[in-house]
Image (cartoon, rainbow, N blue to C red):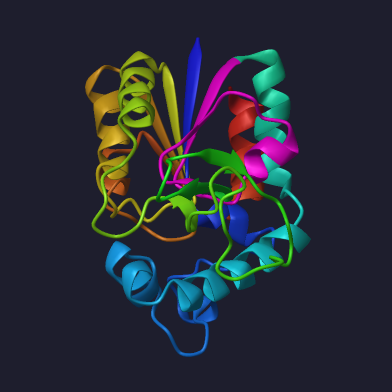
Amino acid sequence: MRIVVLTGAGISAESGVPTFRGKEGLWKKYDPRELATPEAFRRDPKTVWEWYNWRREIIAKAEPSEAHRLLAELERRRDLWVITQNVDGLHQRAGSERVIELHGNIWKVRCISCGARYYDRTVPLREIPPRCRECGGLLRPDVVWFGETLPKDALERAYQLSSEADIFLVIGTSAQVYPAAELPLVAKGRGARLIEINPEETPITPYADLSIRKGASEGLRKVIEEI
């Protein structure tokens, strides 16, 4: 039996990571949509990197939530995959190995000159904006910004896994950002049991076989007892 889990900001909120889209995610009164764009980076890479440095410092202090750890433990016993919209890397820190990152990873950088990609976990950054260790070119966060397409390989794998799921869990996502929001419907259309864990109703709620109005950790404990 294959279990596929789609996670959003709600699972990391329990780790103290702001959503960065809500009020608690504002930085110097900037709306994230003003900073997380290729245009903003071309215009002012220093300010964009100052924002990402602030985010990296917050995430570096965070610990995986109980929900992160429960999924990692379940992966060791079951055929379980995580598809995440988060860029914080907390699933991997909790021990999950089968993780598809739809929006990239905040700890990875990409050179806009030579295309080099690598992890850089330096906190705080020594130089803002940082430079490529390979060619000295300007680095950018290796994440998906507004107006950019999702990585093809990750998206194709996410659709494949969703179509093969026997149980599809949706944890802590508003289910409003596409194409990720379509994945639960793909799974449902192929006969998967669809379970939603979210304190609030979402566009997925009408399609769910079970909706648990709890936080990520409490709701996941209930699901694990059942499956």
* Magenta stretch: includes residue 87: yes
Of the pair 5 and 110, the residue shown nearer to us: 110
Is residue 207 shown left or right of residue 142?
left
Residue 162 against residue 21 in the figure, above or below: above
Residue 171 position in % (x across, y down): 49, 45
* Magenta stretch: includes residue 80: yes
Residue 68 position in % (x across, y down): 67, 41
From which residue to which does the magenta span run?
A: 79-104
Identified at 73% across, 40% down, the residue is 93
Q: Quadrant of residue 39?
A: bottom left
Residue 88 against residue 124 in the figure, above or below: above
Of the pair 205 and 103, the residue shown nearer to us: 103
- Most extreme residue toward the bottom is 29
Counting the numbered discs, the total is 0
Q: Quadrant of residue 214?
A: bottom right
Identified at 38% across, 29% down, the residue is 154
Of the pair 140 and 101, the residue shown nearer to us: 140
Is residue 51 shown left or right of residue 68?
left
- Most extreme residue toward the front is 135
Of the pair 190 and 123, the residue shown nearer to us: 123
Residue 128 position in % (x across, y down): 59, 71
Residue 194 can be seen, yes or no: yes
Identified at 35% across, 20% down, the residue is 192
Residue 128 against residue 14 in the figure, above or below: below
Quadrant including the C terminus: top right
Identified at 39% across, 73% down, the residue is 35
Residue 25 position in % (x across, y down): 52, 75
Residue 213 can be seen, yes or no: no
